[in-house]
Amino acid sequence: MEKQTMAAVMAVGLFTCITLCVYFVMRYRSTAINLPGEERRRQPADWQKPGILVLGIGIGLLIVGIIQNYVSAGLPDSLAVAILIISAGIAMIVANRLDKKHDI
């Protein structure tokens, strides 16, 4: 990959990480504030869905990295993206199933 392309990917990734961190911190603060006279119940699985999704994307990146390093034939870019999307989708399904168990 060229240096310019790599720099662009890194910049987009950094921007995404900062944006998601700010979003989740603000969301946590809004649910953690207790108003007088109002009783709120804290949700234990607040970070569970995003955590499982990030874990699924990380597993997808690991699979793509292993395939690219150990398979001498070149991996098409579309296949790498497909592996990431499939692993993220599976992670979303798992997170939804685990969240449904807590609702019962």
Image (tube, rainbow, N blue to C red):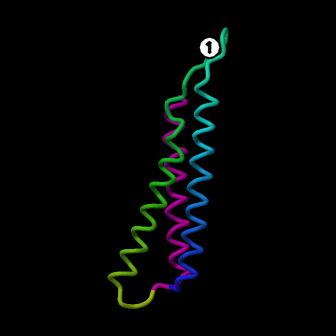
Q: Tell me: 63 left or right of 83.
A: left
Q: Front-most of 95 and 57?
A: 57
Magenta-highlighted residues: 75-104
Residue 35 in the image, given as x and y percentages of width and height: 66, 16
Q: Tell me: 36 left or right of 43.
A: right
Name the residue carrying label 1.
39
Find numbered disc 1 in the image and state the secondary structure of the residue it sits on: loop
Residue 59 in the image, given as x and y percentages of width and height: 42, 62
Residue type for callout 1: Glu
Residue 17 in the image, given as x and y percentages of width and height: 56, 56
Residue that appears at 60% across and 31% down? 29
Place residue 74 in its image quadrant. Answer: bottom left
Is 93 one of the magenta-colored residues?
A: yes
Q: Is residue 42 above or below residue 88?
A: above
Prevalent SS, magenta region: helix
Residue that appears at 54% across and 52% down? 92
Residue that appears at 66% across and 11% down? 36
Q: Front-most of 11 and 66?
A: 11
